[in-house]
Image (tube, rainbow, N blue to C red):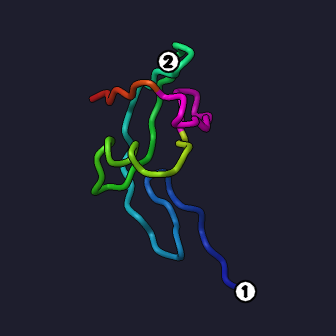
């Protein structure tokens, strides 16, 4: 029986290969004028704009309380990267 460990906060497992990730701190403005802040994980060699233009309809945002929010990209008006 094969055992595996869960990916770390900065890594994701896909087809048994580790993909380096980076955390990006953002503020997201939604179509109903709410703002969400937290961090999203994107590929290490990717820009935030590249990530937002991927065909996936949802993104996962980790907020300051360390809880996860699934956000539908169709409802996002603006994403601001915090440095």
* Crowd class of label 2 (few under 14; some 14 to 19; many from 20; radius 10 Å): some
Q: Measured from the top left, where is residue 41 in percent x and y? A: 44, 46
The spot of residue 55 in percent (x, y) is 47, 51
Q: Residue at x 53, y 61 (%)?
A: 7
> Disc 1 or 2, which lies upstream in sequence?
1
Q: Secondary structure at mark 2?
A: strand
Tally of numbered tags: 2
- In the image, 1 versus 45, the foreground residue is 45
Q: Secondary structure at mark 1?
A: loop
Residue that label 1 marks: 1
Q: Residue at x 34, y 26 (%)?
A: 80
Q: Is residue 23 above or below residue 64?
A: below
The residue located at (50%, 18%) in the rendering is 35
Asked if the magenta segment contains residue 41, the reply would be: no
Span of residues in magenta: 61-76
- Residue at the extreme top of the image, as rendered: 33
The tag on residue 66 is none
Magenta-colored stretch includes residue 72: yes
Q: Is residue 45 above or below residue 64?
A: below
Q: Would residue 4 be found to the left or right of residue 11 on screen?
A: right
Q: In the figure, residue 5 lies in which quadrant? A: bottom right
Residue 14 image point, x, y percent: 52, 69
Residue at (44%, 69%) from the top-left corner? 18
The correct choice, above or below, for 59 with respect to 78 in the image is: below
Residue 3 as seen in the image, left or right of residue 20: right
Whether pointer 1 and pointer 2 mark residues with C-beta atoms closer than 8 Å, the reply is: no
- Which quarter of the rendered picture does the C terminus lie within? top left
- Please state which of residues 67 and 61 is positioned toward the viewer in this rendering: 61
Pointer 2 residue: 35
Mark 1: give few (<14), some (14-19) or many (20+) Cα within 10 Å: few
> Residue 63 location in percent, x, y?
54, 30
Quadrant of the drawing holding the N terminus: bottom right
């Amino acid at each position: 029986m094969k055992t595996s460990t869960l990916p770390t906060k900065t890594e994701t497992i896909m087809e048994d290969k580790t993909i380096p990730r980076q955390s990006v701190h953002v503020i997201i403005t939604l179509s109903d004028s709410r703002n969400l802040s937290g961090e999203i994980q994107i590929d290490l060699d990717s820009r935030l704009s590249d990530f937002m233009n991927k065909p996936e309809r949802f993104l996962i945002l980790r907020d300051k309380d360390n809880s996860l929010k699934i956000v539908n990209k169709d409802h996002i008006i603006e994403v601001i990267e915090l440095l």
